[in-house]
Amino acid sequence: MLEVLERAKTDVTQGGHLSFVKHQKLCIALSKVINICPDALRFSVEYMSSRPTFFIVPEEEQPVKKKPRKKQKPASLLTVCQAVHCLLKSACREFRQVYDWSPFLRFLKTEDLETRWFAVKAIALLTGMSDVQKKIFMRKYIDEETERKLVIK
């Protein structure tokens, strides 16, 4: 598994510059394998510590290439928030130190309720909220009925 992750890491920085879309997709993939492969946690922390955040799309995406290929799109906001939540749920102490998480707060204002729900849950993990604090914080962004539907989903 580590060999596959190393190859993916090499592909992300191919040509000497970071492909944000590939970086984002690798981080999302890491969030999915972190619970099934013990070495993936160490790899993820090391990889993300030396790269920019994957949850905020940079202003200037990539330089224009001579031969345009099919342009890859960044992951959806929902997928990004799910990945962040999964990473923090798996190893909050480690990932809390990796990034400046303040830009992540913008996800609390998104229109999509499911995205906002995952953002609230991730921020609650980041800040180490108690169950009571989580519930109060959740009510500021998601009503009780919507939360019930999302939990069941």
Image (spheres, helix red, strand yellow):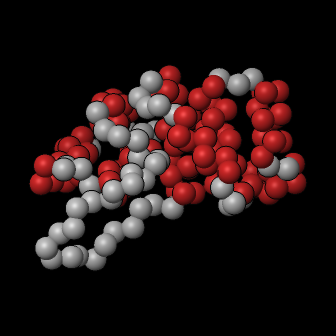
Which residue is more in the foreground, 33 or 95? Answer: 95
Residue at figure coordinates x 21%, y 76% from the top left: 68
Residue at figure coordinates x 79%, y 27% from the top left: 133
Question: Is 103 placed left or right of 52 in the picture?
Answer: right
Count of labels in the image: 0
Residue 53 falls in image quadrant: top left
* Rendered-image quadrant of the C terminus: bottom right
Residue 48 falls in image quadrant: top left
Q: Is residue 36 visible?
A: no
Residue 126 image position (x, y, % from top left): 59, 29
Residue at figure coordinates x 49%, y 38% from the top left: 87
Q: Examine the rendered structure and indicate whether residue 138 appears above or below residue 20.
A: above
Residue lying farthest front? 59
Which residue is more in the foreground, 76 or 5? Answer: 76
Residue 67 image position (x, y, % from top left): 15, 76
Question: Is 104 placed left or right of 22 in the picture?
Answer: right
Question: Is 147 placed left or right of 74 in the picture?
Answer: right
